[in-house]
C-alpha cells in the first residue's frame, strides 16, 4: 500500500505543535506553582528573604557582604557561572561567611528565547565552579523567571529547588524607585522574598540603591521582629 504524505501531514503538525506548546506550558505552570507556594509561605507571616541575582560583582558583592556581616544577616546569592569563575575568591567568601549560593545559569540566557540545546547547556554548572567554594548546588532561579520543559526536567534530575520571588526591588528599572516606597511595600505585605542584583554596573547609584534597600529591609525586620531566612532548610519550608 502506498501512503500519501498529505495523509500524515496534519498528524505531524499536530504532534509538533503539541511538543512546542508543552515545552513552554510546563515552564509557565511551574512558575505559577512556585509563585503561589512562595506567596502563601511568606506573605503576612513575618518572613523575609534577601536574594541577589546576576553576581558576583567584584565591587558590589564585597560591599554587600560587608553590610550583611555588619548586621550578622544571611542572604541567598544566585550566581552567573561566567562571573563566578572570574571571581572565585568572592564565591569562597560567600560560603565562608555562611550565605547560601544558588545557580542562575552560566550566561543568563532567557530560556524562552534560546534554542533547546543551547538553553539546556546554559543550565549546566562547570566542574570548576562546583569545586571553587559553591559545593553542591541545591537552589536554582531561572533568568527572567522564564522556564521550559527542559528547565524543569533539569531541575528535577539534578535535585534543584526552583526559587522565584514576591517583590522586585526595581534596581534594574530605567528609573529607580525610592528606597522608602519599596520598603513600605514589603512592610505592607508582612514579609516577602526580595529580588535584588549584585552585579557591577556603570551607574554607581544602582549599587548604592541595593545597599540602601538591603539595610532598610534589615532594619524593618528588626523593628517588626521578622525572621530573615536563607538556609537550604528555610527554602525547603517556604519554596
Image (cartoon, rainbow, N blue to C red):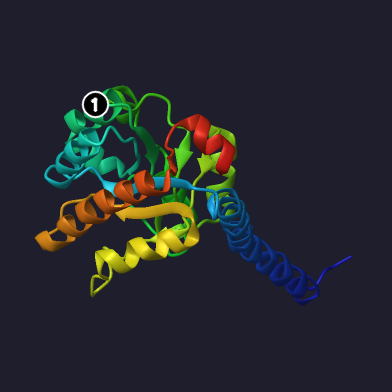
Is residue 146 something that shows in the picture? no
Dot 1 falls on a residue whose secondary structure is helix
Above or below: residue 60 compared with residue 159? below
Q: Nearer the viewer, residue 30 or 178?
A: 178
Q: Position of residue 213 (x, y in %)?
A: 26, 56
Q: Quadrant of residue 187?
A: bottom left
Q: Nearer the viewer, residue 146 or 180?
A: 180
Residue that mark 1 sits on: 92
Residue 99 visible in this rendered orientation of the protein: yes
User: Where is residue 96 shown, x and y percent of the image?
Assistant: 27, 23
Mark 1 neighbour class, 10 Å CA radius: few under 14, some 14 to 19, many 20 or more: some
- The picture places residue 57, in percent across and down from the top left corner, at 18, 45
Image location (x, y in percent) of residue 113: 43, 65
- 86 sits left or right of 160 in the view: left
- 44 horizontally vs 216: left or right: right
Quarter of the image that includes the C terminus: top right
Amino acid at each position: 500500500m502506498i501512503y500519501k504524505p498529505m495523509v500524515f501531514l496534519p498528524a505531524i503538525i499536530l504532534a509538533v505543535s503539541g511538543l512546542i506548546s508543552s515545552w513552554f506550558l510546563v515552564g509557565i505552570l511551574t512558575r505559577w506553582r512556585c509563585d503561589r507556594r512562595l506567596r502563601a509561605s511568606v506573605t503576612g507571616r513575618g518572613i523575609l528573604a534577601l536574594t541577589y541575582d546576576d553576581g558576583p560583582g567584584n565591587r558590589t558583592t564585597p560591599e554587600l557582604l560587608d553590610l550583611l556581616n555588619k548586621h550578622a544577616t544571611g542572604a541567598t546569592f544566585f550566581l552567573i557561572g561566567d562571573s563566578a569563575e572570574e571571581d572565585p575568591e568572592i564565591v569562597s567568601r560567600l560560603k565562608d561567611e555562611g550565605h547560601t549560593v544558588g545557580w542562575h545559569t552560566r550566561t543568563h540566557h532567557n530560556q524562552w528565547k534560546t534554542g533547546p540545546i543551547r538553553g539546556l547547556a546554559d543550565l549546566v554548572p562547570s566542574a570548576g565552579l562546583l569545586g571553587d567554594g559553591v559545593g553542591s548546588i541545591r537552589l536554582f532561579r531561572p533568568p527572567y523567571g522564564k522556564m521550559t520543559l527542559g528547565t524543569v526536567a533539569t531541575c528535577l534530575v539534578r535535585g534543584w529547588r526552583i526559587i522565584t520571588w514576591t517583590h522586585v526591588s526595581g534596581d534594574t528599572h530605567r528609573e529607580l524607585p525610592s528606597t522608602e516606597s519599596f520598603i513600605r511595600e514589603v512592610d505592607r505585605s508582612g514579609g516577602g522574598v526580595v529580588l535584588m542584583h549584585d552585579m557591577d554596573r556603570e551607574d554607581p547609584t544602582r549599587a548604592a540603591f541595593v545597599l540602601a534597600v538591603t539595610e532598610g529591609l534589615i532594619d524593618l525586620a528588626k523593628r517588626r521582629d521578622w525572621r530573615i531566612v536563607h538556609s537550604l532548610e528555610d527554602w525547603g519550608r517556604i519554596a
